[in-house]
Amino acid sequence: MRHGRPLSFRTTNPRKALIRTPCKIVLAALATLFALVTVSLLLSRRTSTERDVDREMEYRSSTKLKQKDSEQLPLRLPNELVFFTYSDRVTKGLCLSMLSAASNGFLLHVLGINDTYVGDVHEPKLKKLYGMKSFLSDRRALERYGLGDETVLIFADASDVLYLGSRDEALHTLQQLLGPLEGGIIVISGERNCWPFVHYDKELIAGGREKCEEFPHRNSSFRFLNAGAYAGAIKPMRAFLKTLHAGILSNVSDDQLVFQELYSKQVREGRHELFELVIDHASKMFQTGHLTSLEGAGTFDEPVPMSAYFNAGIGRVVNSESETRPFLVHFNGGKSAFVPLAKKLGLLESNVTQHLQPDLMSTYRSRHVWFKEKCESDVTVYQQ
């Protein structure tokens, strides 16, 4: 038997119940109101976002930039990307380089033939350096091309370069390599030879071996700088080229030596306040041909480990050392495979220009009076 306080039924105080009921109603109403306000804010934010997107799309579709020589220039956006080269003469290599760019859907701007930017410079290898430095310092010229300080520019040599990828591909790769544009990164092509300090195993310049040892290894045999291709935003590139120009000595005739000396200074003293040079060791963007399978006309398309070759199955040059597909290939050494590779890419067909974008061809013809005669008349002659 249970002892203690007897069991009793719990009764509710009527007065307290009357007080609690309105409180519960008020709390429920507040909760409902809070939910309605939250939903309203979310819908408003979504509507605002959609409205902003609509405005942006409307702006992009309605904004028209000035055109030059029938070229539809891209909209001025932070990720704008353009392609330039410099040559003082028309060569079959230049024509094939232009056609390779057009076959991938973009325009290769050519300076030097119709423009005078080099003054009395007579050293062939220095003309492109002087020419690009003068061009990027010419505000009116930049305005004609619709370029600004944040425009990303790819420069490559004129007569021995073939473009293999699209503009979007190049942009995607450069976004990874350059990082934020305010960082001032200039990506430069890498190669296996430490020119002009050392060629193969022979020292060409006194102290050249020590200079070559300054280059980081980065787990790549393409550890040395090559001046044939580089990319970056125009603002740091302008500072870079001005610094190069200021370092040219009277007895220097090789642009790559000027590049090497500046990179060597960066290794010893740290980056320049306005730019930093970064070598494309993995050939993500630029592939050089010297000391690879690409130097031989009979070997350029043979799969070779730890080298670079043309993979006919995918229609691209492959770097088998870093397992990358470079955006362009520069035949900086032996050039016997240059034309055969162009043929593999379909650039030597007699009607190749008929299959390329009409607006690009129209721009080439209107901008360069020599293009139709030199580059379109009969590209099959390049096989000779």
Image (cartoon, helix red, strand yellow):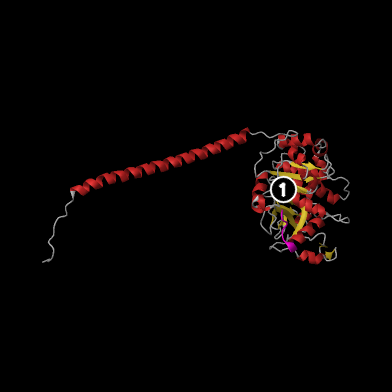
Residue labelled with disc 1: 235
Q: In the image, what residue occupies the spot 39% across and 41% down?
A: 36
Tell me which segment is drawn in magenta.
Answer: 267-274
Instruction: Report the side of 74 relative to 141 (left or right).
Output: left
Q: In the image, what residue occupies the spot 80% across and 44% down?
A: 94
Q: Main secondary structure of the magenta part?
A: loop
Mark 1 falls on what kind of element? helix
Q: Is residue 163 visible?
A: no
Query: What type is the residue that disc 1 sits on?
Result: Lys
Q: Nearer the viewer, residue 335 or 7?
A: 7
Image quadrant where one finds the N terminus? bottom left
Residue 304: percent from left, percent from top: 71, 58
Instruction: Report the side of 55 relative to 211 (left or right).
Output: left
Instruction: Report the side of 322 relative to 294 (left or right).
Output: left
Instruction: Report the side of 345 relative to 8 (left or right).
Output: right
Residue 339: percent from left, percent from top: 79, 47
Judge whether 270 appears above or below 86 on screen: below
